[in-house]
Amino acid sequence: MLKRKNLADGINLPHIAENLNVNKKELLSGTAKAKGSKGILGDLMDGYTKVQIEDPIRAFHENNLQQIVNNVDYGVLKVLQGTWVSYNHNGQNDRKLTGSGIHTTIMPSPGTNAGTIPGKYSFECEEYIEKLTFDLVPGGVRNRGGANEQFCGAVKYEQSIKSVNTVPGKESLKYTPIHEENGMYLWLSDIFNYAATEKTIKEDRGVHAVSPKNPNKNLYKSGYQDETLFLIVNDLGKKEYVTLENLNGRPYSEIIASKELKPGAGQTGPYFIPDYSISRSGVIPHGSTITLLGDISPDNSGYLIEGAPQFPHGNAAWKYDHLSISRTMGGAGASEAKPINLDQPPPAWVFEKLNDKNDKGENKIYTQRILAHPLYPYSVRPDLRLRDSIKGETIKNHVLIELSSKNKTGAQGGILNVPFVNRFVSTVEMNMRMWIETVVENGKEILQLQYEQIIFFEFDFGDDGGTTSWPHIQVNTLRKLEDVSPDQKRLIEEQFPNPAIKSSAVSGSSAPSGCPYHKE
């Protein structure tokens, strides 16, 4: 978990923007004049350090509640505020205004079931456009856990995606709704210790006086059973109960636990330190709900990484964690030790008719269509589109957020599915990388957002009965609506009309959300 450098920030800051040393309006809009400083992201991230067990824990007092609420911490999520839309640049200036995003989707082939012919699947790969809106939740979220309290900065999001396909025989493009999602990001921050007070003890449960018949009533000086008693053998060889104050390290054989709290109870811990700073909860209309946990990933210099994100080239790009081809799909007959170079044309076998002679292990037939797809190499490794989208851009620095539903250690997220999805296309894992970038253009700093999210489905099995993992990947590059060209802005406003102005029925966009969408 990350914390603000100044412990007082969560209580007595009149204006967070002053602490960031950047104009609040520029921070939220994501645009500022390029300066000699670390820029928009640098001024924000400069105030955060990793929480350690020996760090001071702030005490919570009721009379500070309103000040804490007024100064909720959103961390780096603060800069997400606003409407982000697909941004089509790709550094080559030779692509038409189509989709900046790429998705790959693998689904069971019609006629298949888990107990019948294995390994048959349909494959979709399309470009898409997107509108992604973030709204800061005022006042934050107070999680109350007794002696531990946590205040979280909450950010709502809504995502709408449409695939982009050419209409056969025409020059026009077809935009088809394929995905809707909403949810919330949380910045898991601001831990407080809330010790018991005389007021909370009496109000929250009440206290019962010690019974006159209690043989140890004289040990409870307050008149309430709020002491732990220890049975010892005294200097005279007799057994008697004493309080912790009078135990003095002597051995004891029995304990009578205290029944009531004393003022100050909970001061000595244990204190809660979250092992992650960010969570994402989302609802997908196919019938899945997700919880991802993660953090900002630093490099050797810290959480603010200088320059642009680094994506692989050539043979180094053949990494199964980012391919639409999993090892359990046969791996296209390749491996990370003997990769396929995705910056070169596909191998010759991709365009051959495969049989038991040129595909003895039946590994290539599983993946031939993926490498032969018109969107190659993005159909194989979609995040190469992210790499190519920032060619020619001057990226000053960036922050990398990594989230997962299955972490190797620590707290875990998860995925819940409706019965149909659980039975036929079980969704078992989701991993996400998100880059928030500072781009310098025309002497100004503009925020840019790139993401890669990979969801793993499980359905059917291989010839040997083993479970097959089928990756579903989405990548896109976005900028805030005010920072894209007039043509791109016009396209987004046409395809994603404001629901307050036009309903889907009025706009004629009545097609159901589907992934994949079966084209006519």
Image: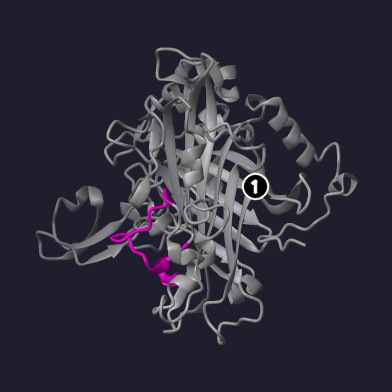
Q: Quadrant of the C terminus?
A: bottom right
Amino acid at pointer 1: Tyr
Q: Quarter of the image for the N terminus: give it.
A: top left
Q: Secondary structure at mark 1?
A: strand
What colour scheme does the image use? Answer: one colour
Q: Magenta stretch: residue 238 in it?
A: no
On the image, the x and y values in percent for residue 466 come to: 42, 80
Whether the magenta-drawn stretch holds residue 340 is answered as: yes
Residue found farthest to the right = 506
Residue at horizontal 58 percent and vertical 49 percent from the top? 102
Q: In the rendered image of this protein, does residue 470 appear above or below residue 194? A: below
Q: Is residue 323 visible?
A: yes
Q: Nearer the viewer, residue 251 or 134?
A: 134
* Residue 158 shows in the view: no
Q: Nearer the viewer, residue 325 or 290?
A: 325
Q: Which stretch did the figure color magenta?
A: 325-344
Q: Position of residue 292 (x, y in %)?
A: 49, 53
Q: Is residue 170 left or right of residue 203?
A: right
Q: Quadrant of residue 472?
A: bottom right
Residue 81 placement (x, y as % from top left) = 60, 31
- Depicted 161 relative to depicted 74: above or below: below
Compared to 39, does 310 lie above or below? below
- According to the picture, the residue beneath numbered tag 1 turns out to be 128
